Every structure is written in structure tokens, then in C-alpha cells.
Image: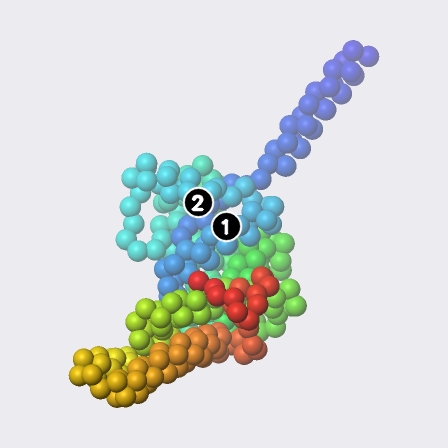
Amino acid sequence: MKKALLTLIILAAASSILNAQSDRKTAVAVMNLKGSGISDQDTRFLTDRLTIELQRAGIFDVLERDKMAEILKEQGFQQTGACDETACLVEAGRMLPVQKMIGGSLGRIGEVYAAQLRLIDLKTGKVEMTSARDYKGQMEFLLTVGMREVAEELSGKLKAQAQTPVQTQTTPQTEVMMQRLLEGQAEREYKSKGWGLFWSLVIPGAGNFYAKSYGRSAFFFLGSITAQSAFTVQALSDNSSGAGGWGLAYVVLRVADVVVANRSVNRYNQNVRKKYGLTYEFLPQSNEIKTALSVQF
């Protein structure tokens, strides 16, 4: 009886140990991806998004990128350019407290953005899984859809593709996300009507210059300076009738300058929206209620 009870206890303990080991996630690290035809800033941002999507997948224990950089620096790891080759990834990975490394490249050819990633087993030094996906259109699709699909494929949650057809279809959710990203990029380039008004009042033509309407800026600057100079000359020569005419011309030019500067800002913002494919009418700071007379800086 005692032997049977002891056997059951041992089996239960062994089972709990095995379950704990099976529940332990595989530790991975994501190396900086190599960008081709994509800016370094965008490449870093996409690498960060891939790390987040891998964490969301819940299959791997993903090493924080700041921690990874700190460890590699302490170990004296040096590299020239992006570490996307298998040998480089293995060398870096064996300095880290992980079992697997993820690395690869992001590129753009024409309107097609490509993501090519590899999952490497550090114990064997071999590529365990690959993911290659192509996306046509805006790079935002690579961010909102591409990094999630790559993360799920490397995690085994998404079936690997035998071929890599160019992805062009989006769900309503991804369309909304892409729209918001484009809106955010456009808003960063908008010109403020408030600053256009301010500069128009301070310096003739400066509001139009601020809105990059250089022809109008030169016209109002030269016209206002001419009218002001003529008014001063006429006033000093006691020619009140002539001075009055030039004074009126100066006031008209200054008022017109302010009005035209406001339109120049509107036109500039509309061109920004066209640049990002946002063709419908849009007012900056749309989350707030404004009156027609409000001024935004």
C-alpha cells in the first residue's frame, strides 16, 4: 500500500514537472531587420511592430529589444550593416538568453513591399522556418497586416504559403487602421491657419510664404512695401490727396494678403491630402468642435 502511494506521488510529481516544462515558452529575440528601399526609421518601426505582434501571438517568450541591445553591447558584439545573414544571427543569438533568433529583411520594388523573415534554431544553427510575403500599395499595409501575418506564420498560428501572392485585399478593420495612419501622416504636414494669419499680420506676404505660395508672397510683399513707401513720401511732401490714395492701397493689400494667405493654407492642406490619397474634405483637428472664427496654432 505504501509503495503504491509512493509510486503515485512520484508519478504526480513527474507529471507536474513535465507539464511545467511543456508550458514554458521558447525564448526568442528579434534582430534589427534589413531595409531595402525603405528608410531606416521605417525599418526600425516595422521591426518594433514585429516584436509586438510576436508577443501578441503568445507562442514565444520574446526578449525585449532594449534588453537585447544592452546584452550585445556588453558582450562586445559588433557588426557592419544589418545582421540579416544566418551566420550573423546565430553569432548574436548565442550571446543572448534565447533558444531561437528571428531576422531577415524588408524591401520595396515599385509598388510592392516584401517581408522575408527566418526563424533560426540556435542549438543546430539551422533555419527552422521562413516567411515570405508581398504586399501591394501603401507601406501602411505592411505595418498593419504584414507584420501580424509574419508573426503568426513564424509562430505556427498561420499556415505558411506555398507561394507568395501579392496581397491587395484588406478587411474593414485594416482599412480603418490604414486610414488613420494616413491621416496622422497628413496632419503632421498640415499648415496652420493661425500661423498663416499671424505671419501675414507681422510681415507682408509672410503668410503666403508660410503656405509655400511664393508667387503670392512676393506680390503682397512688394506691393505693400511700395504702397507704404509711396504713402510716406506723399505724407512728407504735404500731398494729402496722394497720401490718402496710397494709404488706402496699402490697407487693401494688407487685408487681401490675410484673406489670400488663408486660402493658400487651405490649398496646401488639400494638396497634402491628395498626396496621401485622402481626397475627401477634411479639417485639421477633427476631434474637436471649432467655430468658423476659431484660430488654430
Residue ID at (37%, 39%): 70
Quadrant hosting residue 289:
bottom right
Q: Are marks 2 and 1 in contact (CB under 8 Å)?
A: yes
Q: Quadrant of residue 173?
A: bottom right
Q: Position of residue 252 (x, y in %)?
A: 37, 83
Relative vertical location of residue 131 with respect to residue 256 in this rendering, above or below: above
The first of marks 2 and 1 along the sequence is: 1
Residue 223 in view of the camera: no
Residue under label 2, please give it.
65
- Between 237 and 174, which is closer to the camera in this rendering? 237
How many dots with numbers? Answer: 2
Tell me which residue sits at (26%, 85%) in the image. 240
Image position, residue 157 (x, y; %): 63, 54
The residue sitting at 39% across, 81% down in the picture is 256
Instruction: Give the percent coordinates (x, y) of residue 179.
Output: 56, 68
| Local secondary structure at mark 2 | helix
Residue of label 1? 51
> Is 12 positioned to the left or the right of 228 in the image?
right
Q: Is residue 113 left or right of residue 209?
A: right
State the quadrant of the C terminus: bottom left
